Image (spheres, helix red, strand yellow):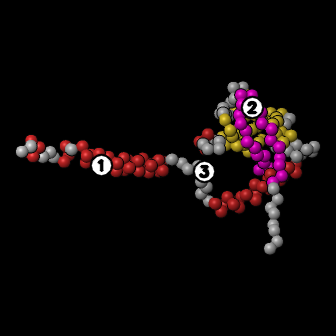
């Protein structure tokens, strides 16, 4: 007789094969728990809660873009100091009243935690200034007056001596086609 036939059988938990077979499902369960945790605690900043309200607001926003184009509004944004100050030089047509303050929204395309909303105060003439957190990379910029009558839009790839020129653009007119 052989020696293996006479030896006592090992308990199942002392064999490597059951553990190896259970390892796959265990990894899947751990990954599922981690995914559920991330889904619950993270903010989905790219999803809008009320699509209907957002849709209604589109017409109002394009009307503000049109108003900026009608007034001939343009702006130049300049970073100053060590990147923690911003100055805006506002340009308008002759006879257009300068607002007392401007609202500047700077939004990161993918990381909403870095977004900034600044109130820029008039420093004299057509120059407005304010403080901000230093910027790096690509940003979406919205500049509007304090009464929210007009707005300027742009994208800014910030460089150390960063300057951004914003010009009012007429929004595209809606096209209706006959049936």
Per the image, the residue denoted by label 2 is 162
Per the image, the residue denoted by label 1 is 21
Residue 59 lies in quadrant: bottom right
Check disc 2: other Cα within 10 Å, few if <14, some if 14-19, many if 20+: some
Outermost bottom residue:
179
Of the two numbered discs 3 and 2 on the same chain, state the one appearing first in sequence: 3
Asked if disc 3 and disc 1 are in contact, CB closer than 8 Å, the reply is no
Of the two numbered discs 2 and 1 on the same chain, state the one appearing first in sequence: 1
**Which quadrant is home to the C terminus?**
bottom right
Check disc 3: other Cα within 10 Å, few if <14, some if 14-19, many if 20+: few
Q: CA distance from mark 3 to mark 1?
A: 40 Å
Q: Secondary structure at mark 1?
A: helix
Q: Secondary structure at mark 2?
A: loop
**Which quadrant is home to the N terminus?**
top left
Out of 104 and 8, give the one closest to the viewer: 8
- Percent of width and height locating residue 23: 32, 46
Q: Nearer the viewer, mark 3 or mark 1?
A: 1
- Percent of width and height locating residue 69: 85, 49
Disc number at residue 159? none
Locate residue 76 relative to residue 157 in the image: left or right: right
Tell me, yes or no, whether the highlighted magenta stretch contains residue 139.
Answer: no
- Percent of width and height locating residue 52: 65, 63
Boundaries of the magenta span: 146-171
Locate residue 115 relative to residue 99 in the image: left or right: left
Per the image, the residue denoted by label 3 is 46
Residue 117 in view: no
């Amino acid at each position: 007789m052989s020696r293996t036939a006479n030896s006592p059988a090992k308990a199942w938990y002392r064999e490597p094969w059951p553990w190896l077979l259970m390892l796959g499902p265990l990894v899947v369960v751990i990954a599922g728990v981690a995914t559920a945790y991330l889904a619950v605690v993270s903010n989905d900043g790219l999803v809008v809660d009320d699509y209907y309200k957002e849709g209604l607001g589109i017409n109002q926003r394009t009307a503000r873009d049109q108003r900026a184009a009608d007034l001939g509004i343009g702006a130049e944004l300049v970073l100053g100091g060590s990147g923690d100050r911003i100055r805006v030089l506002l340009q308008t047509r002759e006879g257009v009243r300068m607002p007392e303050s401007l609202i500047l929204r700077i939004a990161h395309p993918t990381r909403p935690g870095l977004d900034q909303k600044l109130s820029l105060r008039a420093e004299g003439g057509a120059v407005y200034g304010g403080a901000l957190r230093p910027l790096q990379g690509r940003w979406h910029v919205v500049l509007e007056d304090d009464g929210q009558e007009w707005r300027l839009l742009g994208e800014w790839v910030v460089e150390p001596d960063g300057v951004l020129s914003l010009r009012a653009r007429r929004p595209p007119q809606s096209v209706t086609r006959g049936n």
